[in-house]
Amino acid sequence: MAKFSFVAKQAAMVTICVAICHGAMANSTAHSITDGTQLKLTQLKPAFDLSDAQINEIADSVAWRRLLLFPDRLDKAGSRIDHPNFFLAKNGHNDARAELIATINALAEMDNDAICRFPARMHFLATRLKKLGIDVPLDLQKCQEFQAFADSLDAKRLSLIFAEEHPNALASAFAHVLLRADDGRDDDARAMVINYTVVPDADDGTLTATVKSIAGRYAGVMEILPFAKKQADYLQKDERDLWQYALNLSEDEVAQIVRHIWEVKDMARPYFFTHDNCATEIVRLIDVVRPQMALQKRVGNIVIPARIAAILDEQGVVSSTKFIPSVSTIRQAYLNNDDEFDISTITPSRNNPADATPVHRIGIGVGLDDKWAKKATYGISFNGAYQDLLDNPMGVRPLLDLQLLSVDAIVNDEKVKLKDLTIFSTRSLNPANTAKNNATDPKGVGKAWGQRLRFTQVTDASDTSNQDHLVLDVGMQKGKSWNMGQARAGSGEIADTTCYALIDGGVQVGRVNQGYRIGAGPVAGCVHYATDHLRGMIEVAAPYYYHHDSADGVRSGYFQPSLSVGVQADIGRTHAVRAVTKTERNHHDTNTQAMVSLLTYF
């Protein structure tokens, strides 16, 4: 693993990119051992004549365990950081009590090395000891490197910054969140940003990097850099709107978060794209200073950055909200209105993630399938994340079609049939006639595209049996889309209707004839947002499938056209009714499937 180090520049704004690795800091102990060794301190007597009961109470406290990155539950031991430089006790990684005793003894001896390495823990202990009538004169001003770091942030206020979803970059397709540190003013030119992210291997392709990020094969990277630079990257280069949520943390809480960041910034931790990412790190930092809260338990097992803003807002952690439009949103606002439009009066876009529905979805439906004549069919569906074009678009980027780990099954009184198991699927329409088509890559401006990796039920129309089979379906789409209709007055949003024409190509592998078939053909459709709570879409596809077969009565190649229609009406924020139908031409007949489902988002 590559090594990185943190560089503090006093009296200047700094850009720090710390890729976390072993050997980032010199070893030391609570007893100023300088040869790199550590003592097993579980059996050492704690200073200040603290009783076993007092030690156990502090060691078992949620606040202390969170500072060590231990689970809240006492029956689960082990820090998420296993680097020895993060601990004073030799077995501190697995023993919160041993680490507490080592830290108390270091504080009693005024071990400057330990105090300056772990200012958050020392501050926490000094505060707890004071409540026990033990006054420890802790002076962190003597820690020059830490003070230079704290001064560079000059943090009086922390804000959550949300950068909307990037439609053309898989690594940012689920959006991104980071922390802004400033002196309490929105226009603070010295504002800094604290960004927990991942830097993939430059030699890894997009698919490889995505798989490694999901599997935790990359280390987390903590960047600390000027907010103005990061803001310019998002607003101008990526053309992504920003939302700023000021957090109602006290200055003491902000100061403690800064101390804790100093402790963890160089420590190795695996970064998981789905559940240990930029969003969970921000929640974890807030949980460190508010042990009475348990925000991290509310984010779920699959953590989407957009949900963090909603959770913080629901829990009363957000004190104010500010919309910061991207350059493309500003250009679109002029297109929607006129060149004389006062951009300072722009209506905030409806992509505020605090207004979004939850990302998980379960559905129960009833319908029909011609293959099961005169019998009702029942549908069960689950979507792990994120959403498709029929889901409520409030709180997300327009025309976002991005799904991860979704399942659809059909049931009747005879059997259960898996209809779809989507591992990953996305479609980015990027209307060619709007300013909001994302200009990150000039070659990709105005191009619609999509890709999918899934298991799906298909009809083998090569012969008259028209058998259904579950196949692995891998494919891509490319083409164009166009926006039309009416945009919301005073806003930089696109209009309410988008139509598209794509070429779809892919391969299906399974129990179809010859074990595979290659398909390609046109796909065209339209998406219409009638109101904030009602939308529909129609799509026509005409794929041509081919596999070589010389047997009598079997077609090697054939068209299999289909027509799909879908409508969804929202019932509040967490419920909706969806109706979908698909008619497909097979070998010698036409099959129709229809389903009406009640959806619940959670």
Image: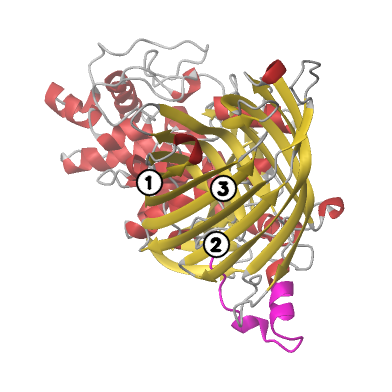
Q: Nearer the viewer, residue 482 or 307?
A: 482
Q: Which residue is mark 2?
A: 536
Highlighted range, magenta: 330-350
Q: Is residue 165 above or below residue 547?
A: below
Q: Earlier in the sequence, mark 1 or mark 3?
A: 1
Picture residue at 16% right of the left edge, 39% below the top: 132
Q: Is residue 385 above or below residue 37?
A: below
Q: Earlier in the sequence, mark 2 or mark 1?
A: 1
Picture residue at 79% right of the left edge, 68% below the top: 433
Q: Is residue 108 above or below residue 341?
A: above
Label 2 neighbour load within 10 Å: few <14, some 14-19, many 20+: many
Name the kind of residue labelled 2 in the image. Answer: Gly
The image shows residue 229 at horizontal and vertical percentages of 70, 56
Mark 3 vs mark 2: in front: 3
The image shows residue 249 at horizontal and vertical percentages of 37, 57
Task: Determine whether label 3 and label 2 are within 8 Å by CB.
Answer: no
Number of the label disc, if any, that sits on residue 582 = 3
Residue 329 seen in the figure: yes
The image shows residue 149 at horizontal and vertical percentages of 56, 45
The secondary structure type at the circle numbered 3 is strand
Name the kind of residue labelled 3 in the image. Answer: Lys
Name the kind of residue labelled 1 in the image. Answer: Gly
- Which colouring convention does the figure follow? secondary structure
Q: Is residue 378 above or below residue 100?
A: below
The secondary structure type at the circle numbered 2 is strand
The secondary structure type at the circle numbered 1 is strand
Q: Quadrant of the N terminus?
A: top right
Mark 1 vs mark 3: in front: 3
